Amino acid sequence: MHPYVKLEHANLSLAWTKAFGLDEDVIQKAIQMNGAFVIKASEMQETLDGSVANFRAFFKWLYSCVLVLMGEPIPPNFEKTTQRSVMNISTFIKNFDCYGYEENPTVKNKFMMERIGQYLIDRDLTIKHESEGNDWAKLLEENECLRNHPTTMPHYPEKSIVQLLAMLKDSVFKVFKAPMRAINDAMATVYLYNCFNFGSPDIPMSSISITKDVMYFAFIQSSKRVQLLQVHFNETTAFEGRLGSFRFNQQSLAESLKILDLQFYSKDILSLLLNECDEPRRSCIFQLSIPLAIEHFRPFELDTEFQQYYSESVNAWDFVPRHCKMSDLPASRFAVSGTRRLCVLLSEDQRNIQLFELECDDEDVQEDADMSVVHSDDLDLP
């Protein structure tokens, strides 16, 4: 969790202690642990950079010694030895005989040839990071009042980053422990209804609240069909549901497009990630208009299984305007933002992403005309 988020919680604790059970001291401790973890991560990065430099200088020098003993010529780039390289070699040799330790008495102690591995073990560091030339550390050592001030981030030189991570998780859990209990005591479940009684429990689903009485649920029933459920609530815990089932058959394709993911773009648009079944497979971002889709809804009893009650589906390609963007990237998941009018595609190998704009205002068309060449390699409008 970001330190700024914890600072917001600290400010809330001053005014909402009774309502949410926030404790300023606990939040301050979490902020300090967050800072300590960042310091330890920077320390580990500095140790890594130093170890790489020491290893490179040492083995370069060792290779040169081997060439001299064998009577082989030394490469020209090996002949230059700077004072910095000599210091790195001496530092490596100095720490070469530092022993590591094992908790198992039957295992012999071994040489600690590198310092990075100790940071990734859940125990104290064998070789602590040197901070002799750190002016800030020297200032804290000489000033106890500054060292113990709540806004000063503590440093645990003997702890590994794994230990700091465990301490950070514990401090964050304590921040939300009291609010979780307070919120649970202040709220009660009015009605719990399990209406998703089909398929895998991990089906892709998205929901959005239209008003305090109306919600929409969208979920993938199969790879070729998506269900859109409209639920009306009232104070008598009575529910009214309407359901629509949609498929996506493009005229130029023999088979329906495969539905991979979905997410509500706004209160009026449901975004779907579709994929072509034939090679080469392209991805399609389809913007389903909810007001147009509602016309194809039918009344639905929430305690009825979907397969038994409603099996007919409507081809959304026939009644929805062609708000669709094609991409040559075979995608697996996506994310959309209606406020930013953006969409992000994640490739199947989860190594590449593609970012593009879904909508464009009229005044932006002329401004973005010069950038069309850049985007044409990634996007094609059907």
Image (tube, rainbow, N blue to C red):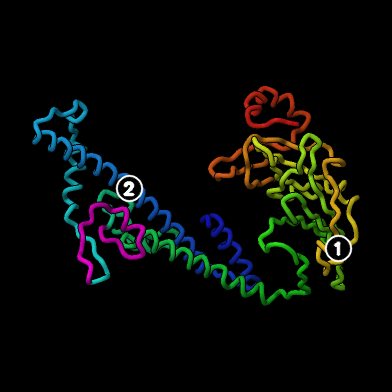
Report the magenta residues as a range: 106-127
**Identity, as a three-letter code, of the amino acid under mark 2:** Leu
| Res 210 quadrant in image | bottom right
Left or right: where does residue 375 sit relative to residue 30? right
Query: Looking at the image, is mark 2 or mark 1 earlier in the sequence?
Result: 2
**Residue furthest front as drawn:** 254
Q: Position of residue 377 (x, y in %)?
A: 63, 28
Helix, strand or loop at disc 1?
helix
| Res 348 quadrant in image | top right
Helix, strand or loop at disc 2?
helix
Q: Residues within 10 Å of mark 2 (few under 14, many from 20)?
A: some
Residue indicated by mark 1: 309
Q: Position of residue 198 (x, y in %)?
A: 74, 64
**Identity, as a three-letter code, of the amino acid under mark 1:** Tyr
Q: Is residue 118 magenta?
A: yes
Residue indicated by mark 2: 48
